Image (cartoon, grey):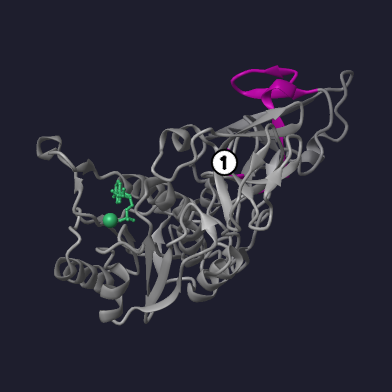
Amino acid sequence: MITIATAKDIVAQTIRPGRVASVPLGQCVGKILARAVATPHDFPLFAASAMDGYALRSADTQHATPARPCQLRITEILYAGDHATRTIDLGETIRIMTGAMIPRGATAVVPQEDVAQTTAQQITLTRAVAAGDHIRPAGEECRSGNIVASAGDTLTPARIGYLAALGIYEVPVYAAPRVAIIPTGSELIRDSAALTPGKIFESNSFALAAALMELGIVPTISPPVPDEENALRHVLHDAITTHDITLVSGGVSVGDKDYIRAVLATLQVESLFWSVAQKPGKPLFFGKRDARVVFGLPGNPASSLVCFYEYVQPAILRWLGHASIWPVSACAVLQQRVTKKDRRAHFLRAVATHDAGTLLVTPQSSQDSHRMASFARANCFLIVPADVQELASGARVDIHWIGEKICT
Ligand code: AMP
Ligand code: MG
């Protein structure tokens, strides 16, 4: 039996960022850039008006006051998307809308609400307009050839918008790994019509697939495989050959028909660890064949999902190129006494709430690894370290948020 820290270390050492693919920007939210991106264009592309108003030569307005207003003749109207053709000459102005290209000769834009009087032919100004006013200069944000995003950047909505504004519609990102889920156990069914005494509804693949989909991964899901060595060998061989990460649930413990480790050995999957000092999820297995990895998740539903959040999700985030891969932790004040007898670390399904700036955490009452109602209510794991036998009410404890905690 190894410690959680050692097991996590092995996972982090084994998994490397995966393949790089050029992916359309519209499919990139949350992905990580694999290489720096340089812009092929300036931004803004050209000097444009920031307001609906009038483009003018600021020098013409220099002496304008309420007593000595300045009048400018309107020669043209420019809308966004128009191509400016005329040059503004002495005493002239061009009506211009937000986003329209600044015409030659213009040095400023006066917003229409700052114009004292307007007719179809001319405008009257009673104050000077400073050069540069309300003009968005070309290349203000970046110049062609500049690096606009770095390797390792997460493609957030704002970054995606920025890249699109630069005409960059495909970017090199770490492509999603191909992930297989294989539920095993002769008791498992997925069809109520097949429910006979002794059978149960297969649920792990649903929880695991949902957790993967939250990471943007659509897994291949196998039908339940009975506890028979040949059937298992066949399905596992197919999965390992065609997937980067295989998640097999059940059959990794010490029961008479827990064949997974033995079958994986015959498929040349090297065992990197088996059995971790934790509860739930002690029989967790991790192995590899070349660059392919296999997680053997204990079949109890709570065990398999705890192992997903603590080990599989970090592995996938690493594959996807993320720098931060471990569950987001926080310090909370325990609301009731917790005791344990063994020397394993416990992940207790718990509910954390904010109370006037303090985080309070209450473990759920039912923690057995076959029980999911408590997990369904939980929003975090309360971590009881291996060497701690008792935590008093009021103690400061570590929690791991389940899923990503983005709002309070
Ligand atoms: P195992 O790890 O195969 O010994 O399974 C431990 C417990 O988890 C047993 O009670 C199984 O029936 C149950 N179990 C295993 N796989 C699943 C699954 N995919 N969905 C629901 N329960 C499962
Ligand atoms: Mg089983």
Q: Which residues are magenta?
A: 99-125
* Residue 45 visible, this angle: no
Are there few (<14), some (14-19), or many (20+) residues within 10 Å of tag 1?
many
Give yes or no for residue 368 being in the magenta stretch.
no
Q: Which quadrant of the structure image shows residue 290?
A: bottom left
Q: Residue at x 54, y 62 (%)?
A: 277
Q: Quadrant of the C terminus?
A: top right
Asked if residue 210 is positioned above or below residue 363 in the image, the reply reads below
Q: Residue at x 60, y 59 (%)?
A: 324
Q: Residue at x 64, y 43 (%)?
A: 339
Relative horizontal placement of residue 124, taking residue 62 as reference (left or right)? left
Disc 1 residue lies near ligand 1 with CB under 8 A:
no
Q: Secondary structure at mark 1?
A: strand
Residue 220's spot in the image, x, y percent? 26, 57
Asked if residue 111 is positioned above or below residue 340 in the image, the reply reads above
Relative horizontal placement of residue 174, taking residue 225 as reference (left or right)? right
Asked if residue 178 is positioned above or below residue 206 in the image, the reply reads below
Residue 59's spot in the image, x, y percent? 81, 41
Residue 94's spot in the image, x, y percent? 62, 35
**Residue marked by disc 1:** 380
Q: Residue at x 53, y 54 (%)?
A: 155
Quadrant assignment for ligand 2: bottom left
Asked if residue 190 is positioned above or below residue 140 in the image, the reply reads above
Instruction: Name the amino acid type tagged 1.
Output: Cys
Give yes or no for residue 106 being in the magenta stretch.
yes
Q: Nearer the viewer, residue 262 or 112?
A: 262
* Residue 127 visible, this angle: yes
Q: Residue furthest left?
A: 193
